[in-house]
Amino acid sequence: MNAIETNSLTKIYSSSFGKKKITALNDFTISIPPGTIFGLLGPNGAGKTTLIKLLLGITFPNAGNSKILGKEVSDYKIKSRIGYLPENHKYPPYLSGKQVLEFFGKLSGMQGFELNRRIDEMLDLVKLEKWKKIKVKAYSKGMMQRLGLAQAMINNPDVLFLDEPTDGVDPIGRKEIRDILMNLKEMGKTIFLNSHLLSEVELVTDRVGILNKGKLIREGKVSELTERKQEYRIRVEGKLPQTITENLLAGQSITVLSDGAYSLKLNDLNELNSFIDQLRNNHIIITEVLPLKNTLEEMFISLIYESDKESVQ
C-alpha cells in the first residue's frame, strides 16, 4: 500500500462568469511509498498548491482520484493520520509555544496526560523545550518553522504535508529543520515537501516530481534525474600527455574542469573501461572516476525550459 497515490487527478477552474477554463492540474498520477521524503518542485502557477489542496480534501477534482494510506481523501477518518504545515503560517503572538500545541492538540481530540506528554515530546524533537513558556512573538523565523513542524506532528500523523518549511530561514535554521525531517523519516513518517529551495530539497528527498503548467513532466530519484548520461569525471596524477589525448580520445568530447579533472563523454561503459585500461597501459595513475551529475537546480531549469518550449510548438 502506498502512502500517497493519485490516479489521473485533474482540476479545472472557471474564470469570472465561467467564460474561460483554467486547467490547474492535468491527469496527475503518482505513487509515493511509505517512509519516503518526496519533494514537489515547480515554478509559480505550476499547480503545486492545487495538488496539496486536493490531497488534503480542501478542494475536489473534476476527474481522477487520490488516496492517503489506501483510503480516499474524502474519507473523514483518514484526516487523523495527516499533518499539515501551510506556507507562512502564523500563530497568535500572545500564546506561548506550549499553548499553541495545546490548542492544536485539543483540535485533534487529545487531552490531559496524553496531550501534555505529546507536547513535551514534540518540543523536545524540535529543540524548543526551553522556550515552551515564551510567547511566540519572541520567536525567530527558524523557531516559528520548528514550532510549525511540532504543530503538524502533534496528532502523531503517518503522512506530513509541508509547504515551504525552510522559507525565510537562515542556513543554521535550515540545517536544524533538515535534521528534524530526517528524524521523522527514521520514525517511518511519509513527508510530502513543497519547496522553492532546490538545494534543500536535494539534501533531504528520496524522490522528486517536477510539475509545470499542471502536468507532471518528470518524477524519480534525485540521483537518477541529475545524472548526466555517459559523461564521466576522471582525475589523474598530473596532466594527460598530448599524445594520449590525440590518440586515445580522437572523436571523443573531453573538457578540462575548473578543478583540473577531466570531463569525458563516451558512448557506453565498455568505452569507459577500454579508456581506463589504455590509461593504465600508458602508466597513467588514475585517482578518480565518477559519473558527472547536474545539480537539482540545473536539472529543474533544463526540464522547465524544454517543457515550455514544447508547449508553444
Image: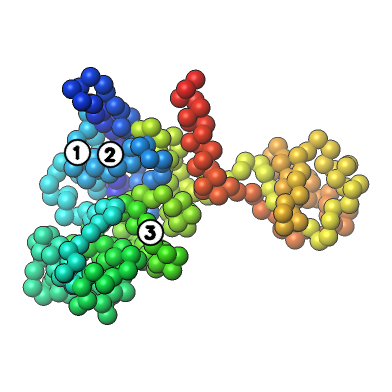
What residue did someone put label 2 on?
50
Answer whether labels 3 and 1 touch (C-beta < 8 Å). Answer: no
What residue did someone put label 1 on?
59
C-alpha distance separating marks 2 and 3: 22 Å
Query: As shown in the figure, which amino acid type bears the numbered disc 2?
Result: Thr
Judging depth in this view, the residue of 187 and 193 nearest the camera is 193
Mark 2 Cα-neighbour bin, 10 Å: few <14, some 14–19, many ≥20: many
Instruction: Please determine whether, in this image, residue 185 is positioned above or below residue 54.
Output: below
Percent position of residue 15, x then y: 23, 26
C-alpha distance separating marks 1 and 2: 8 Å
Q: In the shown orientation, is residue 281 left or right of residue 259? A: right
User: How has the structure been colored for display?
Assistant: rainbow
Question: In terms of sequence position, does the residue under pointer 3 or pointer 1 come before the other?
Answer: 1
Question: In terms of sequence position, does the residue under pointer 2 or pointer 3 come before the other?
Answer: 2
Query: As shown in the figure, which amino acid type bears the numbered disc 3?
Result: Gly
Q: Quadrant of residue 143?
A: bottom left
Q: Check disc 3 and report its element: helix, strand or loop.
A: loop
Question: In terms of sequence position, does the residue under pointer 1 or pointer 2 come before the other?
Answer: 2
What residue did someone put label 3 on?
168
Judging depth in this view, the residue of 140 and 143 nearest the camera is 140
Q: In the shown orientation, is residue 110 left or right of residue 123? A: left
Percent position of residue 59, x then y: 19, 38
Query: As shown in the figure, which amino acid type bears the numbered disc 1?
Result: Thr
Instruction: Please determine whether, in this image, residue 193 is positioned above or below residue 178.
Output: above
Mark 3 Cα-neighbour bin, 10 Å: few <14, some 14–19, many ≥20: few
